[in-house]
Amino acid sequence: MCKNTIMDPEPVVILDPETPYTLDNVYYQILVAGKGLFTSDEVLYTHPESQPTVKDFAKSPGYFNEAFTAAMKKLGRVGVKTGNLGEIRRDCTAFNDPETS
């Protein structure tokens, strides 16, 4: 997507044009309709392991909200590592090499 103004140099891509500022299940309805913006989004619906979840989220705002709430509660218990207890990865898929750190 092209940059929209000089004041805002970062491009913005709306994944849910129907309710872009609302946390709801419309994103999943868009996937079921075959209108996902990215290939990675479409795979959520076309892959047999994730398709049932996408369908359930698309059909039921309540189910989506319950699952989102549960996920946020779990994420809130993860904790933040500080100092030497953690590291900021150069590549999120692998630990940093201690030889080059």
Image (cartoon, rainbow, N blue to C red):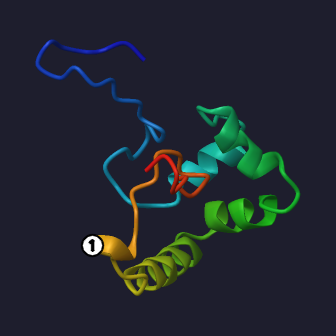
**How many numbered marks does the figure carry?**
1
**Corner quadrant of residue 2:** top left
From the top left corner, tell me how far across and down residue 9 is, in percent. Answer: 22, 20
- Relative placement, left or right, of 45 versus 75 is right
Give the secondary structure at mark 1. helix
Q: Quadrant of the N terminus?
A: top left
- Relative placement, left or right, of 56 versus 30 is right
From the top left corner, tell me how far across and down residue 80 is, in percent. Answer: 33, 76
For the point 76% across and 50% down, the residue is 45
Of 6 and 95, which appears nearest the observer? 95
- Residue wearing tag 1: 83
From the top left corner, tell me how far across and down residue 77 is, in percent. Answer: 40, 87
For the point 40% across and 70% down, the residue is 86
Residue furthest out toward the right = 48
For the point 67% across and 40% down, the residue is 40
- Relative placement, left or right, of 72 versus 28 is left
Crowd rating for badge 1 (residues with CA inside 10 Å; few <14, some 14–19, many 20+)? few
From the top left corner, tell me how far across and down residue 18 is, in percent. Answer: 43, 41
In the figure, 69 relative to 7: above or below? below
**Corner quadrant of residue 85:** bottom left
In the figure, 70 relative to 13: above or below? below
Residue furthest out toward the left = 7
Residue furthest out toward the front = 99
Tell me which amino acid carries mark 1. Gly
